[in-house]
Amino acid sequence: MVSRQEPLIADKFAEGESNMDVLMPRYFFNIDGVEHLSQDVTGEELPDDDAARAEAAIQISEIRAEACQADWDMTEWRMVVTADDGRKIADLAIEPGQSQTARRAAL
């Protein structure tokens, strides 16, 4: 039998803890490119992987708007979203015209 040190979320609610006491997972939104790399060291707490993908889409739109004004070459730029447990959640092209389909990591 496997012993667990931390109680399950359901156990916490049963013990009267509020949902504010339960931590959400943290996601990191890193930018990768040929000459550009931006490491997100802070991350953002979000409810789940789908919320992280939606946040990535918002951030990509903001980057595109800024890049148009600055005339940046984003040809090779990608946003790689990872969870705090190391799983890759999405790998998205930033340059307009490239496929914005998330490549989900194999489970």
Image (cartoon, rainbow, N blue to C red):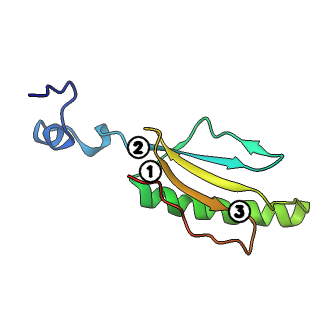
Horizontal and vertical percent for residue 24? Answer: 38, 44
Residue 83 or residue 1, whichever sits in front: 1
Q: Earlier in the sequence, mark 1 or mark 2?
A: 2
Which residue bears the numbered disc 3? 94
Residue neighbourhood size for the residue with mark 3, other residues' Cα within 10 Å, grouped as few (<14), some (14–19), many (≥20) = many
Q: In the image, 61: left or right of 43?
A: right
The answer to whether 17 is drawn above or below residue 54 in the figure is above
Q: Please report contact status of discs 1 and 2: CB closer than 8 Å, yes or no.
A: yes
Which residue bears the numbered disc 1? 46
Snapshot quadrant of residue 71: bottom right
Please name which of the two marks, 3 or 1, marks the residue nearer to the observer. 3
Horizontal and vertical percent for residue 2? Answer: 13, 28
Q: Residue at x 80, y 46 (%)?
A: 36
Label placed on residue 25: 2
Amino acid, disc 3: Ile
Q: CA distance from mark 1 to mark 2?
A: 6 Å
Q: Residue at x 45, y 59 (%)?
A: 51
Horizontal and vertical percent for residue 69? Answer: 88, 64
Amino acid, disc 2: Pro
Provide the secondary structure element on which disc 1 rests: loop
